[in-house]
Amino acid sequence: MPASPTDLNAPSARPAPSGPPQHARNRRRAARRHLRAVDAALRRASTYAHPAGRIVRIETHISIVYLAGRFAYKLMKPVDFGFVDFTRLATRRRCCDAEIRLNRPFAGSIYVDALPVVRDARRCRLGRDAGGAARVRVVDYAVKMRRFEQRMLFSNLLANGELHAADIDAAAAQLAASHRRARRAPATRPFGSAALLRGQVLAALAPLERDPRTADAVRQAGLRAWCERQFARLGAFLDARRANGFVRACHGDLHLDNIVRHGRHALMFDCIEFDDALRWIDVASDTAFLLMDLRAHGRADFANRLLGRYLEATGDYDGLAALRLYVAYRALVRALVAVLKAGPPAAAGADARDGGHGAYLALAIEQTRPRKPSLLLCHGFSGSGKSVASRALADLTGAIRLSSDTERKRARPFEPLDLNALPSDAYTPAAIDALYSRLAGLARTVLDAGHTVIVDATFLKRAQRERFIALASRLGVPLQILDFHADPARLAERVRARALGPRDASDAGEAVLAAQQASADPLCADELASTIGFDTGVPLDAFANAAYWLPLFERMNDDDGTR
């Protein structure tokens, strides 16, 4: 069990004191003395009440983790970085208790207990059975966790080429589930407000503007001015998100070192416990952290997949409006953490100018660049392969996919989808028209947020297509129709196979397919001018290959669109 590399999360906006008073300095000296004794004890196997074997010690700026046998013990160091002050024993106890309580919803199988470290005349030891309160005293507290294999951390899996799409899907499902059940922020507290978020963002940015290793890049990119423009544009939106319940009790520190593969699941551990303002955040901000870290580690494809699966599970398309701001903020935080870990510029030396901050800073700067989105309409009968193909296209490009099958069964954001077949009145002409109207509204939301959108629906009626063609015209965005086709026998075979397979969002059977083939409106000449045909009678892995989509990419480049 590693210590969290982002224990140095976003610094708070409060300024650091110019110098601690004498009593505070004395308290810190005493804390450091007893830390040396506790540290020495926890390095010895005899300190533990269970077989410990060889102790492995992992240290970060604010914590030390001891891997001992089947368990791991996390000790908070008595340090004060301004945004976190662990110099008081009572504070360390509260944080240990909070770490157990707050992490159990995310990774209950890992977290065991918060234990006192007691000391008598001879030695320190762990546990509640102190025996004779007159002879011992509590000198510290430690979080006891079940140990897991370090190689199963997402960061290590990624580094070793062993992180797979199934892991990303598991992380998306876990993240969506945790946000769905998370408590909403109390209305009496400012958590998640635009004003509070602005202070957090600027507090992360300010040290990077001063540090000689990052100052030039930050200034040249105009990051401060861009952030201020985002808050001017999004302030009311962010506050409305808070009022509507999207600020919740989140993890707050979702990077690759804090997620572990556990069987077929992804467990998220080591959430923020020392600052409520960093934990009670918009769910979009929580999601942005992991998206950012995947991109910073060169896996934009995994980030695209994570976002797509998360949105499909939650329906929180509104959050996309602030996603670039949140990604930039999270990248700035990680850049700052890397700079702090590298030490002062003089100590870092000329050969250590980039202590790991470069990729994060580049990603923050990337968010400031304008984007021109496109509107992509799928077209084809049930069984044509448009859903499988369009999902692969979204993973490849980062486009946001809207599925008519999914949205037909969604009551409201963050409510679980009921995949059971809907009654026949869900497929009346009026119900279908209402669905396409809703899809058009969602498409506009995605486009307004600067993202290319793929609308995965049959679009077999001209009126359905005309609604979206008019939308693209009003917004001034390029539109392409992706015509997915396969031979009739393959269409019928796919529809039959889907009916016999695991339940998914589609209710279409052979009768529906036959009705579609009998009543579809052919594409007109104007529509054909914007149409690209795709034969889906190819191996499934072809959809994940950019070569399959080359005609689309060439057309989008001609339209000055962006992938």
Image (cartoon, grey):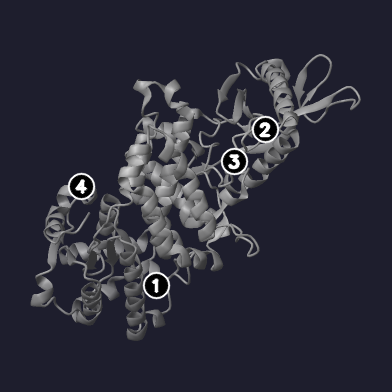
Q: Residues within 10 Å of mark 3 (few under 14, many from 20)?
A: some
Q: Position of residue 532 (x, y in %)?
A: 13, 63
Viewport quadrant of the N terminus: top right
Residue 42, quarter of the rendered image? top right
Looking at marks 1 and 3 on the same chain, the residue that comes earlier in the sequence is marked by: 3
Which badge, 3 or 4, comes first in the chain's sequence?
3
Q: Which residue is mark 3?
A: 83
Pointer 4 residue? 545
Disc ID at residue 20: 2
Specify the amino acid type for callout 4.
Answer: Asn
Picture residue at 44% right of the left edge, 33% below the top = 338
Amino acid type for the residue under numbered disc 3: Phe
Q: CA distance from mark 2 to mark 1?
A: 60 Å
Count of all numbered marks drawn on residues in the image:
4
Q: Amino acid at mark 1?
A: Arg
Left or right of residue 164: residue 453: left
Q: N-terminal of the two: label 1 or label 4? A: 1
Mark 1 highlights which residue? 408
Q: What's the mark number on residue 257?
A: none
The answer to whether residue 262 of the structure is visible from this angle is no
Q: Position of residue 189 (x, y in %)?
A: 63, 60
Task: Report helix, strand or loop for mark 2.
Answer: loop
- The C terminus lies in quadrant: bottom left
Which residue is rendered at x = 65% and y = 63% of the image? 188
**CA gap, disc 3 to disc 4?**
46 Å
Please identify, in this view, whether the residue under mark 1 or under mark 3 is nearer the observer: 3
Note whether 265 is above or below 345 in the view shown: below
Q: Secondary structure at mark 1?
A: helix
Q: Is residue 360 above or below residue 173?
A: above
Q: Residues within 10 Å of mark 2 (few under 14, many from 20)?
A: few
Please tell me which residue lies in front, 518 or 409.
409
Q: Is residue 96 above or below residue 527?
A: above
